[in-house]
Image (cartoon, coloured by chain):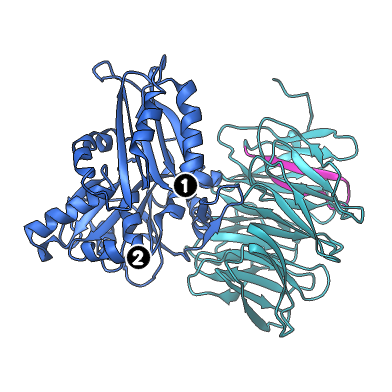
Chain colours: A blue, B cyan
Amino acid sequence: MSDKIPVTVLTGYLGAGKTTLLNRILTEPHGKKFAVIVNEFGEIGIDNDLVVGADEEVFEMNNGCICCTVRGDLIRIIEGLMKRKGKFDAIIVETTGLADPAPVAQTFFVDEDVSARARLDAVVTVVDARWLKDQLKDAPEVKNQIAFADVIILNKIDLVSADELANAEKSIRAINAYATIHKTTRSSVPLDAVLGKNAFDLDRILDIAPEFLEDVHVHHDEAIQSVALTVPGDIDPEKFMPWINEFTQKEGPNILRCKGILSFKDENKRFVFQGVHMILDGDLQRDWKPEETRQSKMVFIGHQLNRAAIEKAVEACRA
Amino acid sequence: MSEPQQESLTQRVVPIEAGTHVIRAQFLGEDPTLALADGRILTGAAGAFVSPHGDAAILVAACNGIILLTGGDDGKVIATSPGGASETLGDEKGRWIDALAIGPSGDIAWSTGKKVVARDGKGERKEWTAPSTAQGLIFAPKGYRLAISHYNGVSLWFPNTEGVPEVREWKGSHLDVTLSPDGRFLVTSMQENMLHGWRLADGKDMRMSGYPSKTRSFSWSHDGHWLATSGADAAIIWPFKDKEGPMGKAPRECGVRHSKVSSVAFHPRALVVAIGYEDSCILLCRLTDGAELLVRPTTKEGGKVTSMGWNRTGNRMIFGTEEGAAGVLTLP
């Protein structure tokens, strides 16, 4: 598990500052070697790292799941990179500005060869503070990229007023209540803000969520929203697993991402899951610490999610 | 569960210290030869190697016993002859070489992304752009014709004709491709853990499913009647003797173990298949009665068997693993 290579996916609309961020990551002194998968050669200049060109080929899987798409080129590239094990410590995938992050993320769950060797560390989305308002109206990609993010770099804040910045942050929160937001100029963030996030370790992320929940109700006009739940006490896996499977099968096309940490009845370990559309991946992880409150937290981000129905269904899964 | 007692050939294996991921294990002439991911090609005397790709990695390799063709992440396609002399036959300027093939009369082909290049024995090059990345290449057993697997099907390209290649369509992502030695059947492995086949005469489709993982290794028996495949807890061997191919027939399962098969290689003269597993074990299995012989026991650090190859007469076999274990078996 721990020797899987961490993969950071870098998304962001055209001109948001993705390449600046990438160059920053690569040139900072960190003693790490990266394999970088890019779409346009030439814009980044590094001697030490392995740079691979990609074609962003999105393939549908014939597994009866209409929204299940993967990046065929990524599967092949990672297979190739794994032959050079030891030559790099982490992989960074840069997507084009217009890319939907779903196929990239799903590749790490769906393809068994990839998931055996690499794990999605985090989706990092760079957002242009100045143009966000317009882009949310005109560019559906931007919403998707924000919805998928674990970490959001709200960039070019020197070009907006304090009010505009607050509004930009509000718009982001309306779509994605749990991502960590870093406000930057020139994509200037410390390396540890974007790398080594271990998106599976959701503690911190899910802890942020509740305080934003009230805000979320204000933005009914947003097509994508988050539904975050906290359930005290234990959950009955016999009830929860069938429900989450059925729910993601039925609502898969509408669910962009979901994540959760669950306290299962008679289980000393925490059950952690995450998913993209219909694809779910879950595992028992570390023990509950004595000082921790046994409770379950989960977040669903997607289109037309029925908050009341989800709350009711999860409530019914309590042990 | 303990595995049945097998007769063992382990004493007849001479190990080779490859030290890194073995991309291809084959005989070049009579020399055991290993193409390694770090760019080295071990061939000839013990410890001898050449590095025609310099510091670059070898990603793919093919061998017909006369040349070893390697494709690197430097974009180069290099042919190495017995003795280690090498010649650069293609240079894609740093774009990764995704697939390679050697034809029956020494023609070669390679691909990078959608670009497919065929180079005939005289050195004349032809190019074709596939509809999506060319994942696998194989030459037809006769004539100058190349099968190219890609998303949603396989294209059959005659490099010396101007016409549009014929396409055999089937929805999904096709990985590796192979043709039966008589040229009647075309088979691909797919992203969805199954094989797809076509009878070329009439384009009839065949689905071969039930694999728990992807098939990444194929091998035809010397008589062309059987196709051994990796991807399950046994070598799955499909019958192709009849006109209908494997349709309506169950495959043979050889060497059932608690580990997935990662590599298969039929003996060049007998119905015996070498089966390499993800746990680094290797067995020889006789198709007629299922008898098994142990070639290499499982070792903790051995790694998945990535490639195996027989010499021309079939008295020696070379193998290599992901973790750099390798060796040569000499049969009694």
Residue B268 pos. (x, y %): 84, 53
Between discs 2 and 1, the one toward the N terminus: 2
Q: Which residue is drawn at 29% across and 60% down?
A: A22
User: Label 1 crowding class (10 Å Cα cut-off): few <14, some 14-19, many 20+?
Assistant: many
Q: Do dots 2 and 1 share one subunit?
A: yes
Task: Tell me the element at label 1.
Answer: helix
Please give left or right for residue B293 compared with residue A70 in the image. Answer: right
Give the labeled residue for mark 1.
Answer: A108
Residue B11 pos. (x, y %): 74, 34
Q: Which chain carries label 2?
A: A
Give the labeled residue for mark 2.
Answer: A97
Find the magenta span and give its range: B263-278
Which label lies toward us, 2 or 1?
Answer: 2
Q: Which residue is drawn at 16% across and 63% down?
A: A156
Residue A161 magenta-highlighted: no
Residue B310 appears in the picture as rendered: no
As measured in the structure, the alpha-carbon distance from the residue carrying label 2 to the one carrying label 1 is: 20 Å
Q: Which of A315 and B142 is in front in this view?
A: A315
